[in-house]
């Protein structure tokens, strides 16, 4: 019966392609992963003909990235919920850190002409209080409506009768006041009980209403034989229950493990899609897109066999190619939205105006290692393969300064230019950090120099090539490091196929390109970056 219903649905879509202009404009299909980069915990909504998505970026600033697309294929960052978090000096890399904490699993909604976003930082105490933001435009500016108690992996939900709820944790619900200023005390409810073999939390709550019914999508972890990580759906006629349950996706994909957590969204033409993330090692948690077919009142995800497909048709072809990762010549007076800082930036110590066409990174305080260095500028890496390079003027570095380009994570491979007295040395180094569990304080940071060469000062080009192809078993998640003195002839240096790693207990993020400059002896030195060149291979 499942196959018959799928065939009927596909026939309807094919027939629609003959009558709807948007479908006659289709381009090449979306290849999964839809975004082969670190975009975890997605929430996606449609407003008119535009899709908006929010994702988790934790300790990176600005935070709460809002991405937009017309076709679910070409995505571009259009804004952020906030520039910085200020609840603790840990967000400034002082008295601890916020690695793996900060902004998590944001819920995005559009209601009565207004955008809303709800997030709860993964923190203890007041730092973990929930934020509710609002804006007239997805691009912002966003303003804070309220702060209230912590809600883990929550979903904001506006019902048709004007009442507002937050669904969170493992099937918990509370009603909010109409002005969203706080919860209504006494409204807490446990709307379902998890099954005996579901270990830990059911996370990633996403609540929608369709044809008068309430649907709560969640990730489920099971450890029974033959059962895997999966996406489940709880359905009810009343928001308070009773709820019934259905597994809507249980599928591995592309040589990686089973995927779950995400949401579903409709098109202006009545079709539905699911957007679900998958863990992919060093690159992080990537996004896949798939058909969503309503079968017996359930939003079933995947192809006719319930599996994540290799390709999916785009919604429309009217949108130009776009990407959330980009090169930059730093000619704009404002920093592009494709960049994020590691923790809050020290704004007076970086500039795009002091030297036209350059990003200036000036040291601001003495620190012992990269993991405590202010103003490390990051972008995601992408699969299957990508390459990023910088051209860097090192002539104004001071003794003890360290600057360069990193494959940045809790385990880091880096190209580091070090000023030693009147000498410059380029090192390819392997770094790693240990963090305390409670405050994420840096308890140990190690750096091992693999290879070093002398430089003459002036300008140097640094490049990192990344390979995340699953078929490349010997070098999966491999980074290779190069330098040049003219930007044309490149020389390999250091570790061959440095292994990039994803560690949820420390940074909990995919590896990023990181551009840095920090002082170990005295402040006031700086480097000028006149370009970040970026390329991505699709094979």
Image (cartoon, grey):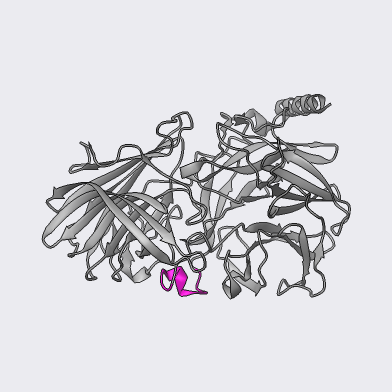
Residue drawn at x 44%, y 46% is 501
Q: Nearer the viewer, residue 398 or 530?
A: 398
Residue drawn at x 50%, y 39% is 321
Q: Which residues are magenta?
A: 85-95
Q: Quadrant of residue 270?
A: top right
Q: What is the x, y in percent for residue 190?
A: 81, 61
Total tally of numbered discs in the picture: 0
Q: What is the x, y in percent for residue 326?
A: 41, 46
Q: Quadrant of the N terminus?
A: top right
**Residue 270 visible from this viewpoint:** no
Whether residue 381 appears in magenta in the rendering, the answer is no
Residue drawn at x 74%, y 29% is 13
Q: Nearer the viewer, residue 412 or 272?
A: 412
The secondary structure that dominates the magenta segment is loop
Q: Nearer the viewer, residue 275 or 26?
A: 275
Q: Is residue 298 above or below residue 330?
A: above
Q: Is residue 363 above or below residue 411?
A: below
Q: Is residue 245 above or below residue 423?
A: above
**Residue 100 visible from this viewpoint:** yes
Q: What is the x, y in percent for residue 4?
A: 81, 24
Apparent side of residue 292 relative to residue 27 in the rendered image (left or right):
right
Residue drawn at x 32%, y 65% is 350
Apparent side of residue 275 relative to residue 365 in the rendered image (left or right):
right
């Amino acid at each position: 019966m499942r196959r018959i219903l799928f065939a009927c649905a596909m026939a309807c879509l094919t027939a629609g392609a003959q009558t709807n202009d948007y479908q006659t404009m289709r381009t090449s299909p979306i290849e999964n992963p839809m975004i082969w980069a670190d975009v975890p915990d997605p929430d996606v909504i449609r407003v008119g003909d535009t899709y908006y998505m929010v994702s988790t970026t934790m300790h990176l600033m600005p935070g709460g990235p809002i991405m937009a697309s017309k076709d679910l294929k070409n995505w571009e960052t259009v804004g952020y919920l906030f520039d910085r978090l200020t609840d603790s000096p840990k967000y400034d890399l002082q008295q601890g850190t916020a690695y793996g904490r900060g902004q998590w699993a944001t819920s995005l909604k559009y209601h009565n002409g207004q955008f809303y976003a709800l997030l709860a930082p993964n923190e203890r105490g007041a730092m973990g209080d929930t934020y509710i933001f609002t804006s007239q435009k997805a691009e912002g500016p966003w303003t804070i409506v309220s702060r209230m108690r912590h809600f883990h992996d929550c979903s904001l939900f506006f019902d048709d009768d004007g009442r507002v709820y937050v669904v969170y944790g493992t099937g918990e619900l509370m009603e909010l006041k109409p002005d969203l200023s706080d919860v209504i005390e006494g409204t807490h409810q446990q709307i379902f009980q998890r099954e005996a073999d579901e270990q830990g939390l059911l996370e990633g709550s996403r609540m929608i209403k369709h044809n008068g019914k309430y649907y709560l999508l969640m990730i489920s972890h099971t450890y029974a034989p033959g059962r895997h990580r999966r996406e489940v759906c709880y359905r009810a006629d009343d928001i308070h229950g009773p709820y019934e349950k259905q597994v809507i996706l249980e599928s591995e994909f592309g040589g990686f493990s089973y995927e779950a957590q995400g949401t579903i969204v409709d098109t202006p033409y009545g079709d539905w899609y699911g957007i679900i993330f998958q863990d992919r090692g060093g690159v992080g948690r990537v996004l896949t897109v798939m058909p969503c077919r309503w079968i017996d009142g359930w939003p079933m995800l995947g192809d006719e066999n319930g599996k994540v497909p290799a390709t999916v048709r785009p919604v429309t072809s009217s949108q130009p190619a776009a990407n959330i990762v980009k090169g930059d010549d730093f000619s704009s007076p404002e920093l592009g939205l494709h960049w994020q800082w590691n923790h809050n930036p020290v704004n007076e110590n970086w500039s795009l105006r002091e030297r036209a066409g350059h990003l200036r990174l000036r040291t601001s305080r003495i620190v012992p290692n990269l993991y405590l260095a202010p103003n490390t500028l990051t972008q995601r890496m992408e699969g299957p393969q990508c390459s990023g390079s910088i051209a860097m003027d090192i002539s104004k570095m001071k003794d003890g300064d360290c600057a360069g380009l990193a494959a940045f994570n809790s385990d880091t491979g880096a190209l580091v230019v070090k000023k030693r007295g009147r000498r410059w040395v380029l090192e390819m180094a392997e770094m790693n950090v240990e963090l305390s569990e409670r405050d994420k304080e840096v308890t140990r940071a190690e750096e091992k120099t693999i290879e070093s060469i002398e430089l003459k000062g002036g300008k140097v080009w640094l490049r990192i090539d990344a390979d995340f192809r699953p078929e490349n078993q010997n070098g999966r998640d491999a980074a290779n490091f190069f330098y040049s003195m003219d930007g044309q002839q490149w020389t390999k240096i250091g570790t061959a196929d440095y292994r990039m790693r994803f560690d949820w207990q420390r940074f909990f993020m995919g590896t990023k390109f990181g551009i840095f400059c920090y002082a170990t002896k005295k402040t006031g030195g700086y480097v000028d970056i006149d370009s970040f060149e970026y390329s991505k291979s699709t094979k």
